[in-house]
Image (spheres, rainbow, N blue to C red):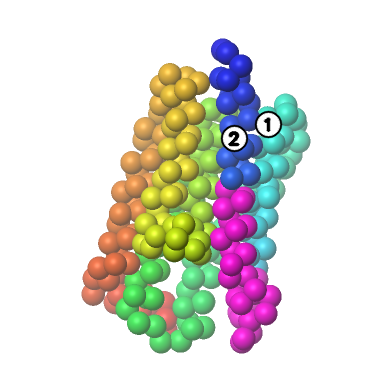
Amino acid sequence: MNKTHKGLDRYFYPAMALLVGAIVAYGFSRTAGANLLHPAAARPVILYVHAAVFSAWVILFIVQSTLISSGNVRWHRRLGVAGVALGAIMPLLGIATAIVMGRWRGPQDPADAAFLGVSFNDMCSFGVAFGLAVYWRRRPEFHKRLMLMASCCLTVAAFARFPATLVHAPWWYAYVDALLLLGVLRDVIVLRRIHPVYLAGIPCIVAAQLLAMYLFLAAPPTWLSFVALFGK
C-alpha cells in the first residue's frame, strides 16, 4: 500500500466525520438564532432536546472516528456504549420532534404536511444503518461504513438550510448521496473494489429517498390523510 492509500485508509473516516460536522454546523447556524436562541415565540421543549441530542451524536461521531484512527480502540469501545444509547433514541426523537413541531405550527398546507415523508425517511434510514452497525460492531469494515452512512443520512436537514446558491431545492438528497459516494471512491482507490455495504446499502437509501421525495412533491391524498392523523 503506497503513502496515498495509507493516508486514505487511516484518515478518511475522521475527515468524513469532520465534513459531516461542518455541514451540520453551517446549515443549522443559519437558522439556530431565529428558531432556538432568539425565537419570536417560545418553541416546544422537545426541539431543544432534539438539537442537543443530535449535536451530541455529531460530536461523538467525530470523536469515535478519531479514536479509531489513532488506535485508541479501548476508549472507542467504552464510548460506544453511550453511542448505542444515543443512537437508539434518535429515530424516535426525530420523528416525535417533527410531529410536535407540525402541531405547534398549527394548520399546515399540503406541502408542509407532505414534508413529513422526508423527516420520516431520514430517521428510518439512520435507524436501519445504525442498527446494522451495532449488529456488526465486531466486523470493523462493516461497522465503520454503516456508521458513516447513518451519519450522512442526517445531513439532509442541514443541506436544506444552505443558501439556494449552494444547494438547490429540492435536490438536498443529491448532496447526501455525494457524501456516500466519497466512501465508494475511497474503496475504489484503496481496495480496488466497492465494499458490499455500499453495494447493498446505497441503492436502498436512494430508493427510500425517491419515495420520500415523491410523497413530499406529489403529496398523494393517501399520504396526506395518513399524516393528518399526527396533527390531531
Give the residues in magenta: 20-48
Circle 1 sits in a helix, a strand or a loop, which is it?
helix
* Residue 120 seen in render: no
Q: Does 225 sit above or below residue 151? A: below
Indicate yes or no whether the magenta region holds residue 42.
Answer: yes
According to the image, label 2 marks what residue? 13
Circle 2 sits in a helix, a strand or a loop, which is it?
helix
Circle 2 Cα neighbour tier, 10 Å, few/some/many (<14 / 14–19 / ≥20): many
Circle 1 Cα neighbour tier, 10 Å, few/some/many (<14 / 14–19 / ≥20): some
- Tag 2 and tag 1, C-beta contact below 8 Å: yes
In which quarter of the view is residue 217 placed?
bottom left
Q: For this rendering, which residue is in front, 119 or 184?
A: 184
In which quarter of the view is residue 90 placed?
bottom right
Magenta stretch, overall SS: helix
Q: Does 90 sit above or below residue 145? A: below
Image location (x, y in percent) of residue 6:
60, 19
According to the image, label 1 marks what residue? 68
Image location (x, y in percent) of residue 193:
41, 21
Q: What residue do we see at 37% from left, 75% from top? A: 113
Q: What residue do we see at 58% from left, 32% from top? A: 12
Indicate yes or no whether the magenta region holds residue 175.
Answer: no
Q: Does 220 sit above or below residue 118? A: below
- Under mark 1, the amino acid is Ile
Q: Which of marks 2 and 1 is in front?
A: 2
- Under mark 2, the amino acid is Tyr
